[in-house]
Image: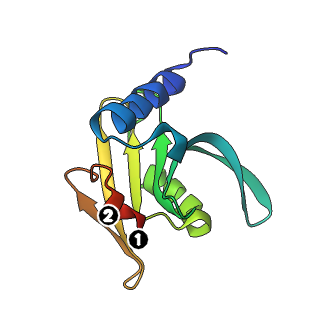
Amino acid sequence: MVLTPEELVRQHVLQFLISEKKYPISHINVEKQLKLHDTVKRYDIVVFNSDGSIEIIVECKAPSIKINQSVFDQIARYNFVVRANYLMVSNGLEHFYCNMDYKNEKYIFLEEIPIYSLNNEN
């Protein structure tokens, strides 16, 4: 495997989720396909709850990529399919976290994503 700048960011985010936020490795899935309308896309990282629902979807970009509205639009499109509770976007230099408000069809920016807790498992 080639360690591209994006892959390096993905590896750092994985370590952050496991070491800092305490998400179990068994709940994390990396670079899998999802069908979005008539196209197949790949998400970078998804963190599952024990019941199979998705807690977090993560989009990783290379450090040279500025995180802007089009990056959020991309993860929001992916999230139409996976319906995660939280979104995370990182280019290794900037990190953004959002909580999904499905009732009002918006996301709310957060300072951090929550630390893993068995309370998340409901």
Which residue matches tag 2? 119
Q: Are marks 1 and 2 in contact (CB under 8 Å)?
A: yes
Left or right: where 38 falls relative to 13 = right
**Image location (x, y in percent) of residue 5:** 50, 21
Residue displayed at 64% across by 14% down? 2
Classify mark 1: helix, strand or loop: loop
Locate the N terminus and report the quarter of the image it occupies.
top right
Query: In this picture, is 83 found above or below 110?
Result: below
**Image location (x, y in percent) of residue 51:** 54, 64
Residue displayed at 27% across by 49% down? 115
**In the current view of this chain or complex, which residue is farthest to the bottom?**
103
Mark 1 nearby-residue class (10 Å; few <14, some 14–19, many ≥20) = few
The colour scheme of the drawn protein is rainbow
Amino acid bearing label 2: Asn
Left or right: where 18 falls relative to 6 = left
Which residue matches tag 1? 122
- On the question of residue 34 being in view, the answer is yes
Mark 2 nearby-residue class (10 Å; few <14, some 14–19, many ≥20) = few
Locate the C terminus and report the quarter of the image it occupies.
bottom left
